[in-house]
């Protein structure tokens, strides 16, 4: 595999354009938390307009910016973006979320920017999360299932990123550990329920990169900073 920016990352801050920031917190404050990259994306209520607004607000700050589009119609063409991280949900019930949406995007875009487009092999684990409902994901998976999905993603499908997604809830450490052991060169992202130094440290032991989302919208800058510190210490 070729060198990728995320080889050196420990922490990603995911900003949901459909969610508010806490009182007094700006996008600039979030960019300055020390996070290695910002992903702009969410599952519900995403539009080109709210995407553009967040990307523009983050653009003047010195942190790599990526869009994580939930569907082809919200992909924006903004030069401030380093690129696009495109989810493909390995345990989706509907093939639309594995390759279908991707096919539609490529079919309707004559000018794909392949040099700035990568995929993330998602394994969606929280059945209560919007993303699980939306993709009809089979979340009834044990450590052996998840490890196998991760290995399939790396070895059979050449995925550079496996993303273990517990969005909204803190994951099962044994499962994250199994995914970590199953991946070799592939970078393992973990996201879900990270809310302080200790929860970040727990998952950062097993995953290469931890992703923090709701905390930024609910608690703000100091809380996010603690998770950056834990990710770096791990
Ligand atoms: C969501 O994995 C991210 O896509 C982060 O999850 O919002 O629970 O931190 P949280």
Image (cartoon, grey):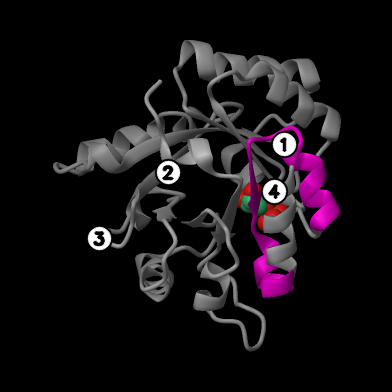
Q: CA distance from mark 2 to mark 1?
A: 19 Å
* Residue for point 71% across, 19% down: 181
Disc tally is 4
* Residue for point 53% across, 21% down: 185
Residue 85: image tag: 2
Mark 1 or mark 4: which comes first in sequence? 1
Q: CA distance from mark 1 to mark 4?
A: 21 Å
- For the C terminus, the image quarter is top right
Which residue lies most toward the front here? Answer: 233
- Nearer to the camera, 25 or 46: 25
Quadrant of the rendered structure where residue 48 is?
bottom left
Q: Nearer the viewer, mark 4 or mark 2?
A: 4
In this view, 91 is above or below 205: above
- For the N terminus, the image quarter is top left
- Nearer to the camera, 41 or 219: 219
Q: CA distance from mark 4 to mark 2?
A: 21 Å
In this view, 32 is above or below 140: below
Mark 3 or mark 4: which comes first in sequence? 3
Mark 1 residue element:
loop
Residue 79: image tag: 3
In this view, 127 is above or below 152: below
Q: Which residue is mark 4?
A: 231
Mark 2 or mark 1: which comes first in sequence? 2
Q: Nearer the viewer, mark 2 or mark 1?
A: 2
Asked if residue 8 lies in the magenta stretch, the reply is no
**Residue 124: percent from the left, percent from the top?**
66, 36
Mark 4 or mark 2: which comes first in sequence? 2
* Residue for point 36% across, 57% down: 74
Residue 125: image tag: 1
Residue 5: image tag: none
């Amino acid at each position: 595999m070729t060198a990728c920016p995320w080889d050196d990352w420990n922490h990603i801050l995911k900003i949901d354009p459909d969610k508010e920031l806490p009182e007094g917190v700006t996008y600039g404050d979030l960019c300055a938390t020390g996070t290695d990259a910002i992903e702009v994306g969410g599952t519900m209520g995403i539009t080109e307009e709210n995407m553009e607004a967040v990307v523009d607000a983050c653009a003047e700050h010195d942190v790599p910016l990526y869009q994580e589009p939930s569907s082809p119609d919200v992909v924006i063409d903004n030069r401030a973006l380093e690129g696009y991280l495109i989810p493909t949900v390995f345990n989706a019930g509907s093939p639309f979320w594995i390759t279908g949406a991707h096919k539609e995007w490529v079919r309707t875009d004559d000018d794909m920017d392949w040099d700035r487009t990568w995929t993330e092999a998602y394994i969606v684990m929280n059945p209560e999360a919007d993303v699980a409902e939306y993709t009809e994901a089979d979340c009834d998976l044990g450590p052996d299932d998840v490890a196998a999905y991760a290995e399939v993603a790396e070895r059979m499908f050449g995925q550079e990123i496996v993303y273990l997604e517990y969005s909204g809830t803190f994951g099962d450490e044994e499962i994250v550990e199994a995914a970590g052991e199953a991946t070799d060169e592939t970078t393992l992202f973990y996201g879900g329920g990270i809310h302080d130094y200790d929860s970040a440290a727990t998952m950062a032991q097993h995953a290469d990169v931890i992703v923090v989302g709701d905390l930024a919208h609910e608690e703000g800058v100091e809380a996010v900073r603690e998770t950056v510190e834990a990710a770096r210490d791990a």
